[in-house]
Amino acid sequence: MTLVFCRTYLSLLMLINYLPVILIMGFAVLLAVVMVKFSTLFGPQRPNKEKQSTYESGMEPIGSARDRFSVKYYMVAVSFIVFDLEVVFLYPWAISFLNFPPQQMLYSLIIALLFILILVVGLIYEYKKGVLNWD
Amino acid sequence: MINFNDLKEIIPLIIIAASALISLLIAVYSKKSGMPVYVFSLLAVLAALIFTGLNVTKDVIIISEMLRINPYSNAFCMIALLSVFITFMASKDYLEKLGINFGEYYSILLFALFGMMTMIYANDMLTVFIGLETMSICFYVLTGLLRKRMKSNESAMKYFLLGAFMTGFLLYGMSLIYGATGYTNITKILATYTAIRTPMFLIGLALFMIGFFFKIGIFPFQMWIPDVYEGAPTVVSGMMSTAGKVAAVGTLIPVLITLNLVEYKMLFSILATLTMLYGNIVALSQSNLKRLLAYSSIASAGYIMVGITSMSDLSIKGIAFYLLAYVFMQLGAFIVVSVFENSTPDGKDFRNVTFDEYKGLAKRSPVLAIALTVFLLSLAGIPPFAGFWGKYYIFYAAIKSDLIWLSVIAILLSVISVYYYLKVIVYMWFKEPEGETSGEAVPVKALSYAAIMVSLAGTLLFGLYPDLFFTFFKFLIK
């Protein structure tokens, strides 16, 4: 039990090393709060209709943003994320492919192809279900 | 570096993963009939079952020490495969009856099975996590399969939110264990465990266990079970309560037994008591058979917890046998409910799931009534059926490891359970049928019939010859 307490105490001592990090984080929060708050406190405020619109120099907003979207948007978003991630995973593999020892090249190629194959099955499924058919 | 020879050790996993993908393609290319995908997935599960059975005594660590194929994990995997196989048999008729016979169902269930097997075979905490998530996400989807019904959606949402929350606990536990030991590899953690029994490790382990207790349905984390099992399609509830439990128990037990957690022994026995108490007492007031089976599933989790508390090789043997018996009896009971169950005229809710609607079932369809009676008696632990031996081995292991008070409580609480199981039996056999459909026999399709017969055969076979199990899994007795 004493050993446990000693260890806890020691690990608290270790935390002292991180003090500068904590200070910087605190300072960053403080700075942000001070800058925003002071400008609203002391700055001149003359609001008008144009200033208070969502984008002062952009399009007029139409309706609320909390609207129902067509389910097709989600389908596209989901497919996009999947293939986006595929690129993210394949990129480091492609970069380091030539650095592999020769006996591992075939192996890593097969693994990458298997990975693509799984996604292709998903794509075929999507295609047959008519997700890519936009009208 | 992984070598190709490793791949032949995981043929069952490859079969399931490949067939999950292929069945997705079969499902979209044969839109008209659900038959091809049904037959294909049944054959795939059967093939995986046979391959696991043939290599059951293998003991290797493969794929960069990510997976460990050993007799224990093979045994639990086979039980999970068996459960999914029986579920598949009964699924087609049920899904057609409710008008949700999507080909995707088979694919998702195969993916869930892949997750379960990965989890059981896992030798690395990250593999455990990937397997658990694959399984859970498939379960969320399957729970909400009756997408036009409020109740099914509600239960899927509830399960998803709670499940995601509990995954957070599990991951945090894993990160603390990693912080305390410096390994994610389970073999290495277990090897260094005595040297690093620090508070950080114990807290991490507790959080890790909470994640699994949620999946098994141990007391403070059991609230989701009745709601989810009631709203989900009945065959899916049956599968979740058997295969899901087998997977979670099969992953957790080898770790807990090796760690030999004397610190947690008292806590475990209290949790076991509370789980059994909650499951059995609340089940007394139920009038819906699906909810009753859900509460009986919580009670069974309590009996399994008694086995976990004993922490011996004997208790692994007991738990494995109990889970096998549990697959037959619980799944069988759920399948009988799924056959009898119907939709209300507006298609918004289940009909024929309350006790009143079971009145006089024996006169209408004697075979269904006999099957359900056997399953319920087996769940209650009446001797000639498999459930009795499951409980016997678990309580025997508990007595052997000096937990006599816990076994006394467990036995007393399983006496209480006899009351609510017998209540259903009384409704079926000793009351007259009521209502407009009172005289008609319940229509049973051949495939569901086969599934019920397989479960019935299993319950009787392992009840009359419990040794069969141990001759096959010799390694469970050391």
Image: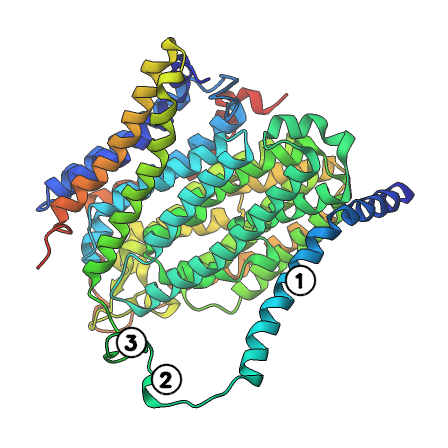
Q: Amino acid at mark 2?
A: Gln
Q: Which mark is residue A52?
A: 2
Could one spot residue B246 in this view of the protein? yes
Q: Quadrant of the N terminus of chain A?
A: top right
Residue at image position (50%, 53%) is B297
Tag 1 or tag 2, which sits nearer the N-term?
1
Residue at image position (55%, 36%) is B125
Q: Position of residue B32 (x, y in %)?
A: 8, 46
The chain ID associated with circle 3 is A
Tag 3 residue: A57
Q: Secondary structure at mark 3?
A: loop
Residue at image position (58%, 68%) is A32
The chain ID associated with circle 1 is A
**Between marks 3 and 1 in the image, the one whose residue lies nearer the viewer:** 3
Quick check: B24 above or below A108?
below
Closer to the camera in the image, B370 or B236: B236
Q: For the residue carrying disc 1, how many other residues have a C-alpha within 10 Å: few (<14), some (14-19), or many (20+)?
A: few
Asked whether the residues under the numbered discs 2 and 3 touch, taking CB atoms below 8 Å apart as contact, a structural biologist would say no
Pointers 2 and 3 within a single chain: yes
Q: Quadrant of the C terminus of chain A?
A: bottom left
Q: Amino acid at mark 3?
A: Ser
Give the color scheme: rainbow, by chain, secondary structure or one colour. rainbow
Q: Which mark is residue A27?
A: 1
Quick check: B64 above or below A116?
above
Q: Position of residue B340 (x, y in %)?
A: 28, 58
